[in-house]
């Protein structure tokens, strides 16, 4: 049940038998030759595909996340931790007020981890509700599937390069990029980080054949679906 394709009447009806909801979490940030909306596209799509057969309402992706390190790249938007947590709290409060009791954040961006801490804090105040967070790209089965094809599955590399995140205008390098030092990267200013990272990929191959990407996606959808099914606590 995709919220952007539903009326409120339909949601009210669904709430009679369903108290779960999925809220995708994305980011608008540099992804090298891929779309700036890569994380938002992936979060929305994985949630839609996973929740589809279950009938769980999937809300529109939160398109902005916490990503100060990439602010040196035009088109990147970063919100403060306090802003982000406040926004997600309002989303949880809204859903709760209408009867949703099991809410899943389906996340596609590493910087959004404060959402997991918020979930714990919010649950302490709403004892009859459950909120949990799924990081789709590093979930164990999905990551293992990626590693069948390459040991490196990093930011903006092949592992985020799907037919729905790549851009027809871009020609990608065919050689692999040496992996950057990630802790060192995050200690830099946005300007230094851009100088250090260059095009924005952290490392690894830029692209894989479509059948590889379909195999990864299939595992990721199934794993996300299992997460939505439970257990819920
Ligand atoms: Zn990404």
Image (cartoon, rainbow, N blue to C red):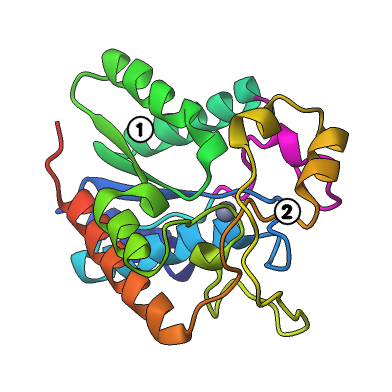
Residue bearing the label numbered 1: 97
132 up-or-down from 48: above or below: above
Q: Quadrant of the N terminus?
A: bottom left
Q: Observer-nearest residue: 107 or 57?
A: 107
Q: CA distance from mark 2 to mark 1?
A: 41 Å
Element type at mark 2: loop
Residue located at (55% from left, 76% from top): 164
67 sits to left or right of 57:
right
Q: Which residue is mark 2?
A: 200
Residue 43, percent across and down?
Answer: 47, 57
Q: What mark, if any, has residue 87 been given in the picture?
A: none
* Residue density around tag 1, few if under 14, some if 14–19, many if 20 or more, within 10 Å: few
Q: Which residues are magenta?
A: 62-80
Q: Is residue 78 visible?
A: no
Quadrant containing ligand 1: bottom right
Question: Is residue 104 found inside the magenta-colored segment of the image?
Answer: no
Residue at image coords 81%, 28%: 189
Q: What's the magenta bit mostly, secondary-structure-wise?
A: loop
């Amino acid at each position: 049940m995709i919220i952007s394709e539903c009326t409120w009447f339909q949601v009210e009806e669904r709430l009679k038998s369903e108290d779960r909801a999925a809220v995708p979490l994305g980011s608008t940030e540099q992804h090298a030759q891929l779309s700036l909306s890569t994380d938002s596209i992936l979060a929305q799509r994985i949630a839609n595909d996973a929740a589809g057969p279950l009938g769980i309402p999937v809300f529109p992706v939160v398109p902005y996340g916490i990503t100060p390190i990439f602010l040196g790249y035009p088109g990147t938007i970063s919100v403060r931790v306090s802003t982000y947590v406040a926004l997600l709290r309002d989303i949880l409060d809204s859903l709760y007020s209408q009867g949703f009791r099991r809410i899943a954040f389906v996340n596609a961006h590493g910087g959004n981890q404060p959402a997991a801490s918020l979930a714990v804090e919010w649950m302490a105040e709403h004892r009859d509700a459950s909120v949990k967070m799924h990081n789709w790209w590093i979930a164990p089965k999905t990551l293992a599937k990626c590693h069948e094809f390459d040991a490196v599955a990093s930011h903006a590399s092949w592992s985020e390069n799907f037919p729905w995140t790549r851009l027809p205008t871009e020609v990608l390098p065919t050689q692999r990029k040496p992996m950057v030092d990630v802790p060192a990267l995050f200690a830099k200013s946005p300007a230094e980080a851009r100088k250090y990272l260059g095009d924005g990929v952290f490392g690894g191959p830029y692209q894989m054949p479509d059948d590889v990407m379909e195999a990864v996606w299939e595992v990721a959808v199934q794993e996300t679906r299992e997460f939505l099914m439970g257990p819920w606590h």
